[in-house]
Image: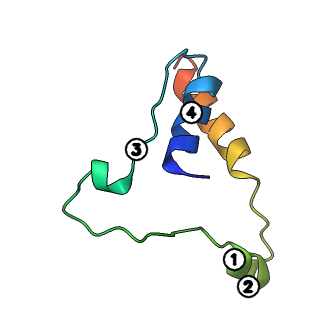
């Protein structure tokens, strides 16, 4: 996904009716240079350790649920 997709999905999972506007990298200047394409490839961890990571949406769902749950 994109950073925009992550933000939209996070807000939806948190039950927030927040509009998230997409912007370009140029519109969000940071001191650090960012790669144009930084897709996370999990093939090596699967090959070396036999670990198959769940889809990012599942990890996000668990993280949002944990953040929103009472302590």
Quadrant of res 29: bottom left
Q: Earlier in the sequence, mark 1 or mark 3?
A: 3
Q: Left or right? Give the position of 26 relative to 12.
A: left
Alpha carbon of mark 1 to alpha carbon of mark 3: how far?
Answer: 32 Å
Mark 2, residues whose alpha carbon is within 10 Å: few (<14), some, or many (≥20)?
few
Quickly name the residue at label 2. 48
Alpha carbon of mark 2 to alpha carbon of mark 4: how far?
Answer: 33 Å
Mark 3 or mark 4: which is in front? 3
Quadrant of res 14: top right
Q: Return the mark for residue 23.
A: 3
Q: Secondary structure at mark 2?
A: helix
Q: Residue at x 62, y 24 (%)?
A: 12
Q: Residue at x 75, y 52 (%)?
A: 55
Quickly name the residue at label 4. 8
Quickly name the residue at label 1. 45
Q: Left or right? Give the position of 23 relative to 65.
A: left
- CB atoms at circles 2 and 1 under 8 Å apart? yes
- CB atoms at circles 3 and 2 under 8 Å apart? no
Mark 4, residues whose alpha carbon is within 10 Å: few (<14), some, or many (≥20)?
some
Q: Left or right? Give the position of 22 relative to 70.
A: left
Q: Secondary structure at mark 3?
A: loop
């Amino acid at each position: 996904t994109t950073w925009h997709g992550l933000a939209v999905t996070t807000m939806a999972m948190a039950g927030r009716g927040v509009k998230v506007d997409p912007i370009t990298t140029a519109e969000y200047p940071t001191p650090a240079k960012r790669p144009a394409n930084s897709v996370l490839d999990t093939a090596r961890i699967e090959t070396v350790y036999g670990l198959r990571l769940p889809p990012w949406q599942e990890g996000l769902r668990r993280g949002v649920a944990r953040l929103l749950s009472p302590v």
